[in-house]
Structure formats: structure tokens, C-alpha cells
Image (cartoon, rainbow, N blue to C red):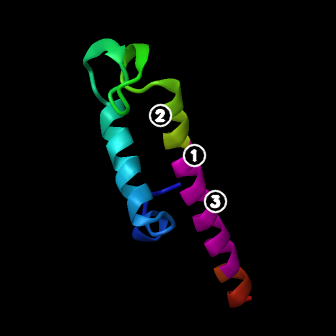
Amino acid sequence: MRRTKEWWNCLTEGERSRLVFLERARGSTSLGVKCAACGSLHVGAGLCASCMQEMADLRDKADKKCSAMHMMHEIEEE
């Protein structure tokens, strides 16, 4: 889903900040054994599985809320 102002407003301020942080950390190119976001041990670059899941959950939450809002607007217009 396209990230409009409405999409971002489907997340709390804390969730928006966390999502931006996770996405930036995911782009980290430093190879090592620590997650770029939480510091837990894992092999590879970027985020551990837990942080990747958290990022996916936040995106899904915004997508679902925004989709529901669009559906409600379409019903009201009919």
C-alpha cells in the first residue's frame, strides 16, 4: 500500500518512530553477528528475525487500518 499521510496516521507516534528506525537499521550494510536494531546475536547483515517480524507487523497494521478506512469512505459515498 502507498504510504500516504493517512497511512502513517494509522500508527501511533511511537509505532511510526519504531518503523522508521527498523527500516533504516534493515538497510545497514555492516556484516556482523548483532542485529542492527536490537543488538541480539544473529548471523548476517541488518535485522534479526524478531525485528524483521516486528517491522512486518507494523506495516500490516497500517495497511489493514488504512484499507478499512478506505472501505468505510466508499460505503459512505454510496
Residue labelled with disc 3: 64
The mark closer to the camera, 3 or 2, is 2
Q: Do the residues labelled 2 and 1 touch (CB within 8 Å)?
A: no
Give the quarter of the figure containing the C terminus: bottom right
Res 57 label = 1
Q: What element carries label 1?
A: helix
- Relative side of 31 to 12, left or right: left
Q: Is residue 18 above or below residue 71?
A: above
Residue count near mark 1 (Cα–Cα under 10 Å), binned few <14, some 14–19, many ≥20:
few
Q: Main secondary structure of the magenta part?
A: helix
The single residue placed furthest to the left in the displayed view is: 30
Residue at the (26%, 21%) spot, across then down:
29
Residue labelled with disc 2: 51
Q: Is residue 64 magenta?
A: yes
Q: Do the residues labelled 3 and 2 touch (CB within 8 Å)?
A: no
Q: Which segment is the magenta one?
A: 57-72
Q: Is mark 2 on a helix, strand or loop?
A: helix
Q: Which amino acid does label 1 sit on?
A: Asp
Residue at the (53%, 54%) spot, across then down:
1
